[in-house]
Image: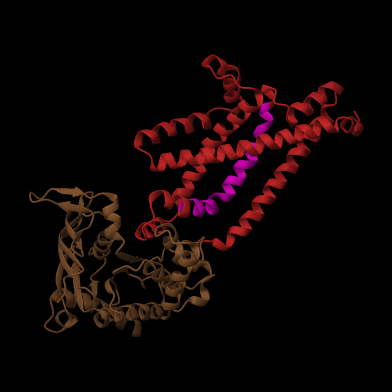
């Protein structure tokens, strides 16, 4: 079996579109998961007990089951519950809800890692609860959770390949169909692996740049 | 003699099963420094945190310039929690300085001092920063305005924390072992800022381990032991002989430690 590059060249426009779609799914899914995860973490920390309990069940369920199955149930089972979504919106919703379960735990740990005295200092100068979240907890938490959040972003990037099962024409879907068309699986999947590795490296590099920028905010030793 | 700034009456605080404060009665005079001293675990910090409303007392009252803090008590002795806006208004007259400084690490010194002016007082940024600079000049750190807390020494951080509290122009300043996490050299610069405040006529409540400092700055000293005010009075009354035996014992441990260092 030989590695035939020309196969790939002939499908460049299709691949470019697939790469674009993977990026879109990932970035929008990541933003959705981040925002939703933050809201869940806030709800669990500041909400009443039953909200904390309910959100706790959500987190357990979505961390406890494979993304593949969640997506299947959402896309194929959704219509029975009156939720008929096209592949792309279904994929975005699935990624957001799945990622949010993990992000909420990252943020929850982040909240707990912010020294309580910083919050007390804010209370003493009269900041309201929402101002404390926005002005103190959120920024301080960001520096604490950044490495874990970058990790989660990478996991979510790789989970986008699962979207192929609900016919989102992202990289996995496109490249494996090229593979089966030409019966060239080694080429196809090597290329796929390279694409993802490249994306992950870029993501990791961005994370490192961000961490370096934020490092001057490091907690001062009292 | 003007009315006292703070009147504490019958204040008790319970954490679960343990009662940390047992019926504290204390008055803090306007324009004076009142120091609270006593052994570890005597409830000094808890008392101060109750005045800052960081802890809510289980019984008794704190009155700040005639207004009840946190709870109102009716004729039959029932405590009712006051509305948030009311609590906030009373708290706004009080500034707090912590042992651990508690500066916000993602803001510069100027950002820390101007934050509440922007978010709470809703001043436009230039005006808030102008006022913050006034306070930074007052504590002698105008040239460090753009530094983050991690770029400042412990003493400088604590001075910025004092400026942060002063920016809101409180009538009363609380100090919770403000120098306890500083080495002796840095302690001096913070104590100087506190002395300056006292000279300016700021009403201060100071919880401290620095007995000498307490004796020199405090117009009134309260000695706390096991959640009770054992004695309160002028430094002369507290330290002049014959002393309360419990205070003698407390001061002896200080001397012991001093002597131990010499040997």
Residue in the foreground of this view, choosing between B262 and B165: B165
Q: Report whether residue A190 is seen.
A: no
Asked if the stretch drawn in magenta spans residue A142, the answer is yes
Q: Quadrant of residue B44?
A: bottom left
Residue A160 percent across, percent down from the top left:
67, 32
* Relative horizontal placement of residue B34, taking residue B164 as reference (left or right): left
Q: Say which residue appears at 61% left-offset and 26% top-offset.
A: A90
Q: Is residue B128 above or below residue A87?
A: below
* Relative horizontal placement of residue B235, taking residue A118 as reference (left or right): left
Residue in the foreground of this view, choosing between B191 and B87: B87
Residue B150 percent across, percent down from the top left:
52, 67
Q: Is residue A78 above or below residue A39?
A: above
The stretch of residues the image draws in magenta is: A137-163
Q: Is residue A79 above or below residue A176?
A: above
Q: Report whether residue A165 is seen.
A: yes
- In the rendering, what colour is chain B? brown
Instruction: Assign the C terminus of chain B to one quadrant of the image.
Output: bottom left
Q: Say which residue appears at 79% left-offset and 29% top-offset.
A: A175
């Amino acid at each position: 079996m030989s590695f035939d590059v020309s196969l790939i060249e002939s499908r460049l426009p299709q691949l470019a579109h697939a790469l674009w779609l993977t990026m879109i799914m990932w970035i929008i899914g990541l933003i959705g998961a981040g925002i939703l995860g933050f809201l869940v973490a806030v709800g669990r920390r500041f909400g009443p007990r039953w909200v904390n309990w309910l959100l706790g069940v959500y987190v357990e369920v979505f961390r406890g089951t494979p993304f593949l199955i969640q997506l299947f149930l959402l896309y194929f089972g959704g219509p029975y519950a009156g939720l008929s979504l096209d592949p792309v919106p279904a994929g975005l919703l699935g990624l957001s809800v799945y990622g949010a379960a993990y992000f909420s735990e990252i943020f929850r740990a982040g909240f707990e890692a912010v020294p309580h005295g910083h919050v007390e200092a804010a209370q003493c100068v009269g900041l309201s609860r929402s101002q404390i979240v926005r002005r103190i907890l959120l920024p301080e938490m960001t520096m604490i959770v950044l490495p874990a959040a970058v990790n989660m972003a990478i996991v979510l990037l790789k989970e986008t390949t699962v979207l192929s099962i609900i016919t989102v024409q992202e990289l996995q879907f496109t490249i494996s169909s090229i593979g089966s068309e030409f019966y060239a699986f080694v080429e196809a999947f090597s290329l796929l692996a390279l694409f993802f590795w490249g994306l992950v490296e870029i993501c990791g590099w961005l994370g490192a740049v961000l961490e370096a920028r934020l490092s001057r905010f490091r907690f001062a030793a009292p | 003699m003007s009315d006292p700034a703070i009147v504490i009456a019958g204040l008790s605080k319970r954490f679960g099963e343990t009662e940390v404060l047992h019926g504290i009665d204390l008055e803090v005079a306007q324009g004076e420094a009142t120091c609270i001293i006593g052994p570890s675990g005597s409830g000094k910090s808890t008392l101060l945190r109750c005045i800052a409303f960081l802890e809510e007392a289980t019984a008794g009252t704190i009155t700040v310039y005639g207004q009840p803090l946190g709870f109102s008590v009716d004729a039959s002795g029932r405590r009712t929690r006051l509305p948030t806006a009311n609590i906030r208004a009373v708290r706004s007259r009080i500034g707090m300085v912590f042992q651990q400084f508690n500066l916000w690490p993602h803001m510069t010194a100027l950002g820390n001092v101007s934050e509440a002016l922007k978010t709470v007082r809703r001043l436009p940024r230039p005006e808030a920063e102008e006022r913050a600079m006034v306070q930074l000049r007052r504590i002698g750190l105008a040239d460090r305005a753009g530094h983050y807390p991690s770029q400042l020494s412990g003493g400088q951080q604590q001075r910025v924390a004092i400026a942060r509290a002063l920016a809101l122009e409180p009538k009363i300043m609380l100090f919770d072992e403000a120098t306890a996490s500083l080495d002796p050299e840095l302690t001096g610069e913070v104590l100087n800022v506190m002395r300056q405040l006292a000279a300016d006529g700021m009403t201060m409540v100071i919880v401290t381990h620095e007995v000498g400092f307490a004796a020199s700055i405090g117009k009134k000293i309260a000695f706390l032991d096991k959640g009770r005010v054992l004695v309160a009075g002028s430094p002369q009354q507290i330290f002049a002989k014959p002393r309360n035996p419990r205070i003698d014992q407390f001061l002896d441990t200080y001397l012991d430690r001093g002597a131990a260092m010499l040997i």
